[in-house]
Amino acid sequence: MSISTNEYLTTLNQGNAFYNNSALSGIIFEFVACDVSNTFNVTPTISKATNYGLTDVSAVAVIDISSSLLNNLFYFYSADFSSNTNMFDVGNLLYGINKDFSFNLPFSYAYIRQGTISGTGTQQISDDYVRYIAQTLFNTNNLADVFTNQIDLVVGVVNMDSSFNKTLNTNITNVTGTGQTRTSASGKHLYLDNSSNSTNNLYVDSCQSLLDGLINIGSTDRGKLFLSDISNQAITNAVDVSNGIYFIPFHQYDLLSLKLTYNFGSTLSGFPYNNAVGNRSYKIVLNCIS
């Protein structure tokens, strides 16, 4: 299925895991295994009462990255890929992930593209989430004179970046299943499994969705680039390729999305409208700008 970058970045409803970017030579991929939540534990304090003023997500936010940051994430095994015919023996493919991969991203600095509490394209998550708390408790998104500890609240959101990264990385490191762990020539520990077991492991399933998507768009410019990448690995990663192991490269204009959910962990009482703050989820779109 094809969709433009703007269409993708301005919808809160979730659809397919893989899209061909109709406006650019890129792909759009939703990494469904990376759907994690953490708890926000900074309690807001007020100065005065204020008058009334993935699954789907609450908002979509974007971080610009280099595509090279994602190049060692997804791996697959093919015993007989032919660079002459660009053919895979699908029945013998194994799909997987690099257990040593680490995210280290400033999620709180991602800019909201759709679903922001106030403004469009100018709110970062660190500001948007605090405005969401204000809107829930006071029916206003204006932070002025609402919280006496506004800075602490924003810093609290920023400080959650490390816990989100840690959760994502721990989940990847601890991936297990009916498959096997193989070591690449560079020492990376790769978890690989076959397609019949992919539905039991979201990481394997994600890799299969990504590879199937790229193979199915093989006639497009982006699909041809992928096939060229795989053929070129016979030279640059000769040892791995001789053992049937390939990684899936990302390129400029590609998008990869994660889902983060912020759970509110403080106990509140005495607020004028609501004493409970629900969860707020963000689709974090990693935009490969180079």
Image (cartoon, rainbow, N blue to C red):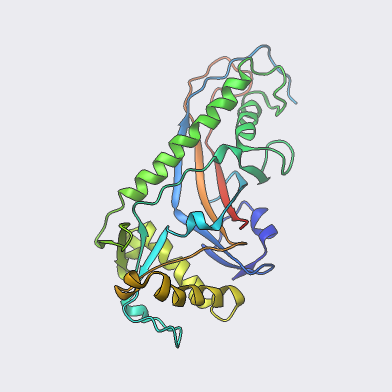
Query: In the drawing, does residue 259 fall left or right of residue 173?
Result: right
Locate residue 212, reporting x and y percent.
46, 72
Image point 59% across, 71% down: which residue? Answer: 1
Locate residue 146, reporting x and y percent.
68, 18
Query: In the drawing, does residue 172 fall left or right of residue 120?
Result: left
Residue 193 seen in the figure: yes
- Front residue of this view, candidates 49 and 146: 146
Locate residue 165, reporting x and y percent.
44, 41
Up/down of 191 relative to 164, above or below = below
Image point 44% across, 44% down: which residue? Answer: 36
- Front residue of this view, candidates 134 and 156: 156
- Rendering quarter of residue 96: bottom left
Up/down of 134 relative to 88, above or below = above
Residue found at the far bottom of this picture = 85
Query: In the drawing, does residue 37 fall left or right of residue 183?
Result: right
Which quarter of the figure is the C terminus placed in?
Answer: bottom right
Image point 57% across, 81% down: which residue? Answer: 219
- Rendering quarter of residue 241: bottom left
Residue 195 seen in the figure: no
Residue found at the far top of this picture = 47
- Rendering quarter of residue 97: bottom left
Image point 51% across, 50% down: which residue? Answer: 258
Locate residue 49, reporting x and y percent.
68, 14
Q: How many labels were placed on the picture?
A: 0
